[in-house]
Image: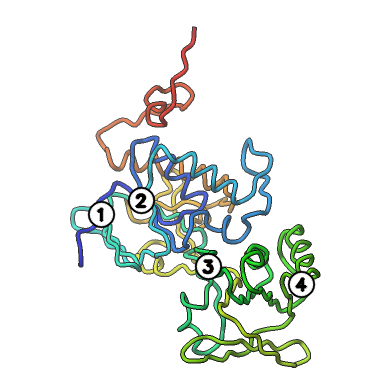
Amino acid sequence: MSHLPTQTDAIIIGAGPVGLFQVFELGLLEIKAHVIDSLPEVGGQCIELYPDKPIYDIPAIPVCTGRELTNNLLKQIEPFAPQFHLGQEVTKLERQADGLFLMSTSQDKHFLSKTVFIAAGVGAFQPRTLNLEGIDRFIGKQLFYHVKYPEQFAGKKIVICGGGDAALDWAIHLSEIAASVTLIHRRDDFKAAPKSIVRMRELCTNQKMELLIGQLTGYEEHEGRLAEVALTNIDGDTKKIALDDLLVFFGLSPKLSPIAAWGLDIDRKQICVDTEKFQTSTPGIYAVGDITVYPGKKKLILSGFHEAALAAFAAAEYLNPEKQIPLQYTTTSTKLHKALGVQSPTFE
């Protein structure tokens, strides 16, 4: 091992809504957490798949977008100062002789934790990639499946592939700063917010971007750099498009491994848990959210919130077996008010 592992009370694998709320429930019980996610930003499916689409079944919030839900959860957990480790997977998890869990990530980070919470949705999300031989060598140089620094595309010829929210949102945004934007989709039908589709077509009409229907079937390089891509339309005609950078948004594909190799009881790619503690078959490892399976399981965000609360109490008992863990209410508990950094109300 290249360096000493970070020691912590809890590791949460997954930074979607349920993983974020798990931070909150643990924080109320004075359990500090680190959060690891394979995606480059927090929010899970909410941010990657439907950031601007409405969600109607979050209690007491009549409607919010995936982005708003994520931002509100981040605000809620601020008092507990969780540490995030994004853009990396937990590749290895081993229980040590003293009961602690040693974990390694794909970025060669190491953790030693007393408890583990798997809130990984339906697995670690990976971007669906271009199926063109050899093009992977341009990833992170001229080929991008995520946008981290949009300003790097200023003044450049950009080709964007995809027909969902991410593709249209970035095409619209980059049309303001790029030298040119060409949007490519396999058909003239888009799975994106209606206002984004309208705006994209307006920009095409005003020659601020170009829409081409077809699929990428090849590419050319010049002096080791990606120089142009080949687009083939439904009639079989091929057109070459010069570019500086290629952005691909084909959606995400879930992958359960390496969780599948951790020795947990799994049923059809879902982790078996009990409904009292949401503990897996390994004591000290809990699972919440869409990755779990139990009788009556419903894959809803609000169900995951309930599971996170029970898992947190179970972990507190696991960490302090000799201590009674009282149920306190954020409305009245001065201890919880202190943890949250809020003023306790005075009643006359």
Q: Real-space Cα distance between discs 4 and 1?
A: 52 Å
Q: Real-space Cα distance between discs 1 and 3?
A: 28 Å
Q: Earlier in the sequence, mark 4 or mark 1?
A: 1
Which residue does the numbered mark 2 point to in the structure image? Answer: 34
Quarter of the image containing the N terminus? bottom left
The secondary structure type at the circle numbered 2 is strand
Q: Where is residue 213 in the image (x, y as percent from the top left)?
A: 74, 80
Q: Earlier in the sequence, mark 1 or mark 3?
A: 1
Q: Real-space Cα distance between discs 2 and 4?
A: 47 Å
Q: Which of marks 4 and 3 is nearer the N terminus?
A: 3
Which residue does the numbered mark 3 point to in the structure image? Answer: 146
Position of 316 relative to 227 (above/below) = above
Q: Earlier in the sequence, mark 2 or mark 3?
A: 2
Question: Which numbered tag is attached to residue 119?
Answer: none
Residue furthest right in the image: 205
User: Hey, what amino acid is under mark 1?
Assistant: Thr
- Say whether marks 2 and 4 touch (CB < 8 Å): no
- Say whether marks 1 and 3 touch (CB < 8 Å): no
Which residue does the numbered mark 4 point to in the structure image? Answer: 207
The secondary structure type at the circle numbered 1 is strand
Q: Real-space Cα distance between discs 2 and 1?
A: 9 Å
Q: Quarter of the image holding residue 131?
A: bottom right
Q: Number of callouts in the render? A: 4
Label 2, residues with CA under 10 Å away: few <14, some 14-19, many ≥20: many
Report the coloring of the rendering: rainbow
Which residue does the numbered mark 1 point to in the structure image? Answer: 6
Position of 177 relative to 43 (above/below) = below
